[in-house]
Image: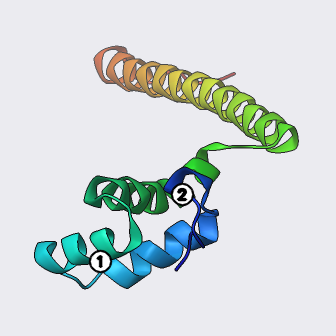
């Protein structure tokens, strides 16, 4: 028995996890019988199962200071590159417009001969 006579609030995480594993394949009736034999409630097992399922999610959101700084630097670099890309696109669009105007002007007035 995971609790060894202790109340369920004093059980170790490993003991609670063991209960979740043992009851994973049981139906409601079997879980109720299991709980009666160990002095716990089915609701506790549900809470422990949810905690087990969410255990890795909490670790994913927790970042170290170095990881936060690295992510911040990467975001700053991305913003700078996006600004450069916008400037390059604007310059390219301006050059295309000027080239188009030059072609139209040449078509209307003819190409000037250079001396």
- Report, in whole angstroms, how far the alpha carbon at label 1 lies from the one at label 2: 24 Å
Dividing the picture into quadrants, the one containing residue 82 is top right
Which structural element holds mark 2? helix
The disc placed on residue 108 is none
Residue in front for this viewpoint, 47 or 72: 47
First of labels 1, 2 by sequence position = 1
Label 2: which residue? 55
Residue in front for this viewpoint, 28 or 33: 33
Q: Is residue 90 above or below residue 71?
A: above
Task: Mark 1 and mark 2 in contact? Answer it, CB < 8 Å.
Answer: no
Residue shown at the point (52%, 21%) measured from the top left: 90
Question: Quarter of the image containing the C terminus?
Answer: top right
**Residue 18 image offset from top left, x and y in percent:** 50, 78
Label 1: which residue? 34
Label 2, residues with CA under 10 Å away: few <14, some 14-19, many ≥20: few
**Residue 8 image offset from top left, x and y in percent:** 51, 57
Q: Is residue 37 left or right of residue 53?
A: left
Q: Is residue 28 left or right of residue 57?
A: left
Color encoding of the figure? rainbow
Q: Which residue in the rendered view is the most extreme toward the front?
A: 5
**Residue 110 image offset from top left, x and y in percent:** 38, 21
Residue shown at the point (25%, 85%) measured from the top left: 25
Dividing the picture into quadrants, the one containing residue 86 is top right
Residue shown at the point (37%, 52%) measured from the top left: 47
């Amino acid at each position: 028995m995971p609790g060894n006579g202790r109340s369920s609030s004093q059980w170790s995480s490993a003991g609670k996890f063991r209960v979740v594993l043992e009851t994973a394949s049981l139906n409601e009736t079997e879980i109720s019988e299991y709980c009666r034999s160990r002095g716990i409630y089915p609701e506790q097992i549900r809470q422990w199962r949810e905690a087990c399922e969410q255990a890795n999610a909490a670790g994913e959101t927790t970042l170290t200071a170095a990881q936060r700084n690295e992510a911040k630097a990467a975001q700053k670099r991305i913003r700078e590159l996006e600004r450069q890309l916008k400037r390059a696109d604007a310059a390219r669009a301006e050059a295309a417009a000027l080239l188009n105007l030059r072609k139209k002007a040449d078509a209307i007035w003819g190409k000037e001969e250079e001396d």
